[in-house]
Amino acid sequence: MRALRDWGEALARYAPLLRKLAGFTEPAETWDYPAATFRDQRARLLDRLHPDRMRLRVERILVESPSAMTLRTVRTDGPLPVFRAGQYVNLFVELQGVRTARPFSISSAPGSPWLDLTVREVQGGFVSPWLCREVPPGTEIESTGPQGSFHYEPLVDGDRLVFLAGGSGITPFMSMLRHCARTRWPFRVHLVYGSRDPRDVIFGRELAALSRAHPEFTWDLVVSEPPPRWRGRAGLLDAATLLATVGREGLDASRVFVCGPPRMLETVRAALRDLGIPAHRQKWELFGTPDDITRSDLWPRRLGRDAEVEVTVEGHGSFRARASEPLLNSLERHGFALPSLCRSGECSLCRTRLKKGRVIVPAGVLLRQSDVWSGHIHPCASYPIEDVILRLP
């Protein structure tokens, strides 16, 4: 009862602010409730501030580049929750009889009346082609509430930031930059944005406009596969590129945020190590698993690209699966729905016991030491290279 009283006193003290954030419309006097109803009221408040699930309706579709578009959504089952610029939501979809989920960073600024989710179509992908080609305005999609820790912390990150983005990894940075443009810029930002093709740069025009309007923000575009007449900067986000764009002094004085696909992250990780940037001044967000794990140095050369293994789920039988596909994808295709959020090996929600067999895990995927000792893996970022036996959570 003492804990309930403490909660009640805190809730009463901050009631006006909490009511505004959570979107309550009932009279304020209803917040003076007896302890018997406290749990229900607290549950309602927490659900509005941080919902477990939301229903999102696509209001508009904005074309951002030849391969990317933004789904501008509104929530239909309540007010939009508060979120931090840089966070993501997990969309739940059912396609071809398979229920699965994919995370997408929020690209709109906190405080907007909508939630923008920017999607780049992955060739040969399962969910992104459907979102980019077949979802019309009016479609409703279930999602989680905002998740993730890839956001600016004023007490830790300081007032000079370097953003290193690759491809669709620009989306969480766009939310941060838009938030800064809507408020007072609390820091200086230098963005280095890597793209394969200068004609397929997501948010290119808006980034250029932001840099013209706000001297606190500068950016460089680096093209990895430049066309013949390209006059801009070309190459990868390696040590030489970072020194040429940000400079030694800028790197030494800044907090470095990194977001992009696995191959780009490997290059940046090596560059920051070679440049001596300490780990405590780096913040990382992994965007998915490799497009082709068979190109990794970890892939056994004895296995062909189309090799299959047998996956046995204790108590539920076996099925054949492609070794080059994450285990979670294969499990979902055969009717096993595991909880998941990041699908990049970070959140640990899908952790599963590997009873027998071997898997390979891309660079950058981190397991807790306790999971290593107990034989647990993250199926979303684990590739079976021989027959395996799993015990699902």
Image: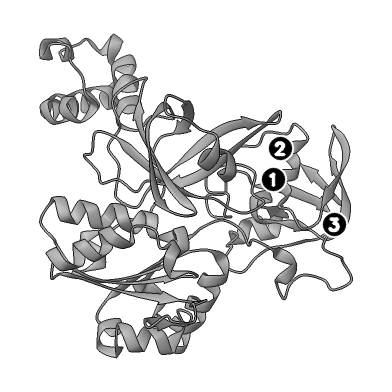
Distance from disc 2 to disc 1, alpha carbons, whole Å, reads 6 Å
Residue mark closest to the camera, 1 vs 3: 1
Amino acid marked by disc 2: Glu
Give the residue at x 28% y 24%: 45
Which is more toward the observer, 54 or 135? 135
Q: Are marks 2 and 1 in contact (CB under 8 Å)?
A: yes
Residue at mark 3: 357
Residue 32 placement (x, y as % from top left): 15, 13
> Looking at the figure, which quarter contains the C terminus?
top right
Residue that carries the numbered disc 1 in the rendered image: 328
Q: Is residue 341 left or right of residue 21?
A: right
* Residue at the image point whose x is 13% and y is 70% from the top: 215
Quarter assignment of residue 28: top left
Mark 2 vs mark 3, CA separation in Å: 20 Å
Nearer the observer, 335 or 65: 65
Query: Nearer the observer, disc 2 or disc 3?
Result: 2
Q: Nearer the viewer, residue 302 or 231?
A: 231
Q: Is residue 209 above or below residue 136?
A: below
365 or 118: nearer the viewer: 118
Regarding mark 1 in the picture, which secondary structure is present there? helix
Report crowding for label 1: few under 14, some 14 to 19, many 20 or more residues within 10 A (C-alpha).
Answer: many
Look at mark 2 in the image and give the residue it sits on. Answer: 332
Q: Secondary structure at mark 3?
A: loop
Q: Which mark is residue 94?
A: none
The picture places residue 229, in percent across and down from the top left corner, at 44, 82
- Give the residue displayed 18% in from the left and 69% down from the top: 159
Name the amino acid, label 3: Gly
Q: Earlier in the sequence, mark 2 or mark 3?
A: 2
Mark 1 touching mark 3, by CB under 8 A?
A: no
The N terminus lies in quadrant = top left
Q: Secondary structure at mark 2?
A: helix
